[in-house]
Image: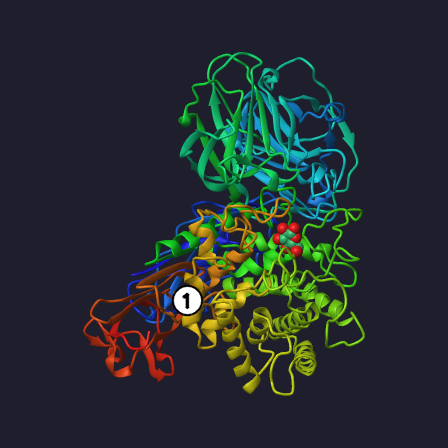
Amino acid sequence: MLIVTKVRCEYKENPIGISLVAPRISWQLLSDIRNCIQMAYRIQVSKNADFHTILWDTGTSTSSQSIHVQLTGLHLQPKLRYYYRVKVWDQSGAESAWSSRAFFETGLENPQLWPAQWICAPAVQDMGHSPRMRKFVNIDKAVRSARIYATALGLYELHLNNQRVGDQYFTPGWTSYGKRLQYQSYEVTDMLKKGSNVLGALLGDGWYKGYLGWKNDKAMFGTRTALLLELYIQYEDGTEDQFMSGPGWESSISAIVSSDIYMGEIYDARLEREWTDSDGWIPADIIHYRKDIIVAQENVPVLQQEQLKPIALFQTPQGDTVLDMGQNMVGWLRFAIQGSPGQKVELEHAEILDAEGNFYRDNIRNAAQRIVYTLRGNGLEQFEPHFTFQGFRYVRLTGFSDKIQLDHFIGVVLHSNMERTGHFECSSPLVNQLHHNILWGQKGNFLDVPTDCPQRDERLGWTGDAQMFVRTASYLMNTAPFFTKWLRDLKADQTAEGGVPFFIPNLKESFSSGWGETDHSSAAWGDAATICPWTMYEMYGDTLLLQEQYESMKKWVSYIQEQGDNPYLWNTGFHFGDWLALDSEPGSYVGSTDIAYIATAFYAYSVSLTQKAAVVLGKTEDSEQYRSLHTKIVEAFQNEYVTASGDISIATQTAQVLALRFGLIQGSARERAIQKLEELLHDAGDHLKTGFVGTPYLNPVLSECGNNKLAYKLLFQKDYPSWLYQVTKGATTVWEHWDGIKEDGSFWSADMNSFNHYAYGAIGEWLYRYVAGIGPDENNPGFKVVHIHPHPGPGLEWAEASIKSMYGDIISSWRKTTDHKMTVSISVPANTEGVVILPGAQRTELLEGVIPAEQADGVKRIEAVEQGVRLVLGSGAYHFVYPQSHT
Ligand code: BGC
């Protein structure tokens, strides 16, 4: 049995409104035999759902490629649905049936020449209200299909005949608005009716015009919200029609008195009107605004993802009425309420209670996160906000009646609709809670851009945080479309010299972060330019994105090269350093690892990644240049920082970790650094002192360098500072500071103390890649070759992880049995190969069920290696049992 499944176009299931660039098709194979390899594929594309006329047929194409097959031969027309299907042959000649039918649909031919006009409502905006825009559309024929293409300056929400259009939120998403603006496409065929239809839009300030940054600053990208829209209809009789934003549109106020990402929403339900209402409408203004920056939607949309019920309602010692959601979450509270007309209720959102159990929101700083709702007062009414989101666990309720019903509140979790790919579980409930917290860090901070935190007046696409977490994020969820969009913004926002802003999308030029002389290019932050595209390549085999970002990677490297007088060291400029590390004086934001050391280490690393990208892209000359540049940086690094006796002159944990992780030292210097790291950790009572820069690599380096037990020791520490310290303090997401809450219950500080900051959650990569042992292969990316090398360690009886890779499900699970055996169960998807290391095994002892492993079907090679037994396997599920030795 050979089946083609999960057919996707540009990572998406049946996308509509894609750009006219030849899309890439990916699929997965399911087979009941081991060692299944695709020998050939065939793709057919048709305009008809029944494939009556074939537009394009690859014929039987001899190839094992089953991801990112680009339909280069197909000449795409705009606004057209293309059905496609795939079949494959395996190496035994078995032929699959056709996959189930999938489709993609193209969007506008040239969004930059869009004949629709920008419309806005200045009078309404001046009042602070969110404008409503509308147009009546008369239809007198049967509709075959209808689409809306829309974008906005600010945020928009569409309504057609009083129904919300689509399920997306925060459209058109956050891009570097001055340079790139996405439009969305909606299928609305069934929402239209014969006769008069009313098409409406609500506009919100969003990231474009609302508050952004921590200086109470507004209107980072523009001062007026506006809408650009086209309704395109095809009738049954073959004719078509278009209704564009422009003349004939009207505007009026909405019940949204104000709505702001940070501040929350003020809503007066007494102002609600039907879209067809005749009062208070005035003609919309037409404005001229550029369209040459408009692109089709790239990221997956933000959707309502899950709903949480509050777990408690209580009175604080100070007498506040507070709801507890049981989880630090991002989104909003939907509530139902009954009361009198004009009654006002208020909901304030906070992450944490203080030591006395009182509602605490000082760490949210200027982001009010406040919902004020004025009741209509005619029965049970329900509300959820529109253009704002909150990061919270606790909600203070005011103005509600005495009898508050818990089931009238629902926490609505919103984030980018990334497929959940990673699952991890082990014998330690605390570690499982840590994994849960990491996952929720991603849910909360992947709302269209990767943010540092989702609650205070920041919520920015900090580059450093993104590069620290990108590998973990890409285990947990499919992040490819998410980072594709963000990296395009990074590229667009890079300075002419190649500098990378501190956050992407960057804010307006007049906004000064106040750090350093320029608002760009800190080491370990700007390196997001190389690390993120390379991670996408490793995890998803996305060569096209690598190619797209290659110039940006090069520019970043040449920017560094130009700094200072030594082209091989980076010892100038402002850097955040090992942010929040614990090895400098108490209360300091910056750890004690020399910033030039960190900068030079990352310089070497970025050059090495750019060199690898050059090899992948066949740029031989570049690759040679980067290779020699890398050698010189490493030489300069060693001259500068390695003493005559072979020690690293910077005696911090992070310094050892970076040199080891980036391969900057060899031979005895490497051995000494491994030893030094161990010593430094022991000196700290087997505790870490690393900050944002060192922490993500700490445990991987330990496991890689023969010190896996120490990595486990760090993982299992429960006192400060450690990952589990916060878990034992009741954390449900990952904290910004190791001591966000101190042992005595007090807080680190009020001004910089997020309880949902994913940076230290980068330990997630270690759980998947080392504890469970699933790793990609940079020479066969996207898990075409799957590495499975579990690293059992003291404190865990078992662990298992699975990831949904581009090729299918990968599973690795190990367990120490009571009779001192180790069992390892793995699964390698069809059309891939597994390279497996069974830790602590000896070749003669392997059993797979009752068959000796070497005779088992699918096993291609087996050999004894230092760490155990190494097997090369064809696809399939395998189960090994062997006596447990030194684990
Ligand atoms: C953010 C960080 C960021 C840092 C720069 C903070 O305000 O929250 O996560 O990376 O600034 O060091």
Describe the element under mark 1 as helix, strand or loop: helix
What amino acid is found at the position of numbered circle 1 in the picture? Answer: Tyr
The location of residue 760, given as percent across then percent down, is 53, 57
The location of residue 744, given as percent across then percent down, is 50, 48
Residue 856 in view here: yes
Label 1 Cα crowd, 10 Å radius (few <14 / some 14-19 / many 20+): many
Q: Quadrant of residue 577?
A: bottom right
Identity of the residue drawn at 43% across and 70% down? 710
The location of residue 101, given as percent across then percent down, is 42, 49
Identify which residue, 587 or 861, lies in the foreground: 587
Identify which residue, 414 or 1, lies in the foreground: 414
Residue extending furthest left? 850
Q: Which residue is mark 1?
A: 712
The location of residue 128, given as percent across then percent down, is 71, 26
Residue 542 in view here: no
Q: Would you place residue 668 above or below residue 574 in this image?
A: below
Identify which residue, 200 or 673, lies in the foreground: 673
Quarter occupied by the N terminus: bottom left
Name the colouring of the figure.
rainbow
Q: Quadrant of residue 666?
A: bottom right
